Structures are given as C-alpha cells and as structure tokens.
Image (cartoon, rainbow, N blue to C red):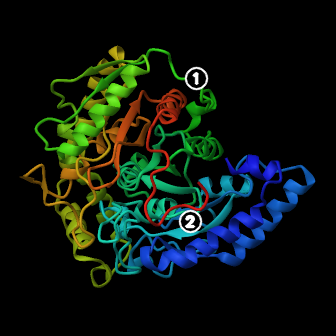
Amino acid sequence: MLSEGYRTRQFTPDEVLEQVLARIGAFNPQLNAIVTLDAAGARNAARASTLRYEQGYPASPMDGVPLSVKDNIAVAGFRATWGSRLFADHVPTRDELPVARLLQAGAVILGKTNTPEFAMQGHTDNLVFGATRNPWNLALTPGGSSGGAVAAVAAGFGPLALGTDGGGSIRRPASHTGLVGFKPSSGRVPRCDGLPAIFLDYEVAGPIARIGRADDLHQQDRVINGARDPASAPFAQLPFAVDPAPPRARILHIPAFGNAPVDGEITASVEAAAAHLRSLGHQVERAPHFDLADDVTARWMTLSQAGLAQLLEAHPGWRALLTPAAIASAEAGAAMPATALFDLLQAIARLRSRLGQVFADYDFLLTPAAAALPWHLEQTHPLHIDGRAVGPRGHAVFTGFVNAAGLPAMALPCTPSASGLPIGLQLIGRWGDDGPLCALARQYEAFRPWATAWPEVHSILR
C-alpha cells in the first residue's frame, strides 16, 4: 500500500504522482485508456496530501493514492461522456457519491477512463474517443465496459481505478488484463448524483487493482461503501471487514454454464486454481452440470435495452449521434412488450431462490471470469469459442447472473495462456459476504506464482 511508503517518508504523494504522469505521457497515446486528464488538479491534490503526511495527519490510508474514474461516473468539472456523442459536452457539477467519498479520503483523481457507448458493450470503443488497447497485446481489446480502467491500471497509470459493473464490466476486463476486479454486493456501494441508471441498481461501482495489491482494492472499497439510501441501509449493520480466510471453505467449482463453450486454456487454468484452493485446505467440489443462470443470461440484455430506450425518449434527434449498436439496442428496447421485462424479473426471482439452495451447501462459487481470451480490437466480441460459433454475450456467460442476484464477486488472475495472455477466475460469495470473499481472495493471492508477470507496458509502482 502506498500509504505505508508515504507514512515512513520513503516517497511522497508528489513524487509518486509525477512518476504516474510521466507514465501516462509515455504510453497513453498508444493505449487510449485515459480520455480526460487533469494533471494540474492532480498535482494540487498530491501537494495537499504531501503536506498532510508531513504534518502527521493523513485523511485516510487512501490519502495521496492516484486513481482514475470511469467515464460513466460523475466527477464535478470533468466531462462525463458515457462514451456517447449524445453526452459529449456533459460536465457534471457534482461528484457522484463514491467519488465524493474518495476525495474526502484524500485520493488523487487523475482523470476519466474510456468506456463503450452507455457502458453496454463487452469491448471498449466509441465515436467520441475511439478504441482502447490491451497493454498485453496492442492488437487486442481489454474488454469492456471498464476497458479504459483496466488498461490504465495494467499500464501503471496509478494503482487503482473506479469502475462500474452491470453484467461483468469490471470482472471480465480485469481477467483480460491480469488484474483484480471487485463487484460488491448490491447496496454495498451507494450511488447518487450520477448519470441515469439504465441498468437500475443491478449496476454497481467497484474497484480495480493491480495484481499483488488486493489490499489496495479492499481499502478503496472500505472508503466508498456504506449506507446512504434504502438499498444500502442494511450495510449500516454489516460493516466491511476483511477477516482471516475460513480455514475450510466449501467451494463449488463450476467449469461451464449449461452447454455454453469455454476456451480450453481457460478451463485448464481455473482447474489448476481449484486444485490450488484445495491444497490450501478448502473443500472444493466440481459441479458436473450447472444451468441455474441460463434463463437470466438469455434475457439479460432486456434490462439495458429497455433502460436505454427510456433514456432516449428525452433526447430527440438521438439517432444521428449514436453508434449502430446503440441504435439497435434502443430500437429493441422500444419494441419489446412490457411482459419481456417482467419475464426477466421473474427469471431473476427464480435464480435467487435456487442460488439460496446452492449457498446452503457452499460458501463460495468458483468459475472462469470470462469464457474467451482477449480478442481482436476491431471485433465487438469473439465470433468463436472452443471452435463453436457464439453471439455477442458468448464470452460473458459467467458474470451477468451475479448482478441479477446481487452477489459479491471478484476476478483474480490465474495461470496465463500459452501465449502469455492473462486469464482470470471468478470467486462469488453470498450477499453481504464481501469481507469473507476478500479474505479468501487475499489468501489465494498470497500463494500465486505469477505475481511478477506484467505486460511489456508494465507498472513502475510494483
């Protein structure tokens, strides 16, 4: 954690920030991860943080930590384009609540990171800023919709990023870039003063961290979580704490969902992670078949399509500004009957009931974070997985159901592919068990053998 170095005067927030800004200047033109940079504001914040440490009164362990914010989260005075020309000139006057809490804690906001239009795609490209590249291979996508956020952290543009996850948008990109990505329980991180909620409260804000620094991720989540609205009120009685990992957790390893294909290297990598968890003393059982999520996965796009159609009713002339993909989504949302959305809500209710039965027997679920390795930058999604043709959500089968059920989940790196591309696993806990999930993740990370594996565009703050 940087705060320990600040506290012991090994380096100052000023010095760290200058290194990060130099890194951004050198590599962001190649990656297109940060789309709005506030170097002057960051320097002012870092200087104020340095003074607080010199006086012995830092605001929090997050004081002086440089981080970026996804471009669908409001930061006062920064453009929040949401990756769309429709919002190209939108400048919020108030910080969204997680950002306000980070600023109160002394964090140094570097700028905004790229996202696909309305954060609705599994790759990161838009008509405002263009495509973001994967630091591990510039010909590939980092995924989406938090693609700019993960590319920034993987390249060393600060140790942390704040992203959003409405169906895997933190976890899958983290898996494609060798990072840790945390989707908190629904309600854990209250949100207000932001952009319209086209994903309703199924989309949550959460942190992304560099491999080997999961404690940084946990610390950021402690800052941004807590009660503020009715959805988050239960967490006033559930304080966030990372206790020691349970000595013998019951883990259900789910290698595939239904008949959906999974890349063979991903399957093998997560199998190895399951064996590793078993070697740590945990009870890990392999599910022979798992189809609880299939119904929700098949209907999941209904939610964002309906939300986008409703949003655009207030913006006449939107067709001239949007990408073909967004236009198609909006048209699908406008054309669907009200019963389609109700069908999704009923599927979610059935899923939650059935998962309740699963969690009666297991403490955590283990799955791949994504079904495919990173794919070519110019493709919206992989066209084939394990030799089988797939649609736009074929790579995303493991993540959307977690949002539907409101559960906490974390993507963690596991053994990379033969070509060196990152692969991520996903650990899922019961609702509210964010702390035990983070504890298990921290235990797993402590024994991983690839902690020093970085892309050629690697971090200077390892």
Q: Residue furthest right?
A: 55
x then y, percent, for residue 116: 36, 68
Instruction: Name which residue type carries label 1.
Output: Pro
Residue type of the residue flagged with mark 2: Phe
Percent position of residue 434, x then y = 51, 32
Placement of 321 over or under 363, stated as above or below: below
Secondary structure under tag 1 reads loop
Residue 78 found in image quarter: bottom right
Where residue 223 appears, x then y in whole percent? 65, 45
Per the image, the residue denoted by label 2 is 157
Residue 93 visible within the image: no
Instruction: Identify which residue, 440 or 360, lies in the foreground.
Output: 440
Q: Which residue is mark 1?
A: 244
Q: Nearer the viewer, residue 377 or 76?
A: 377
Residue 166 horizontal side relative to residue 305, left or right: right
Left or right: 331 in relation to 17: left
**Residue at coordinates 92% horizontally, 54% vertically from top-left?**
55
Q: Earlier in the sequence, mark 1 or mark 2?
A: 2
Say which residue appears at 54% left-offset and 69% top-offset: 112
Q: Secondary structure at mark 2?
A: loop
Picture layout, residue 370 above or below residue 246: below
Tell whether 433 sits left or right of 4.
left
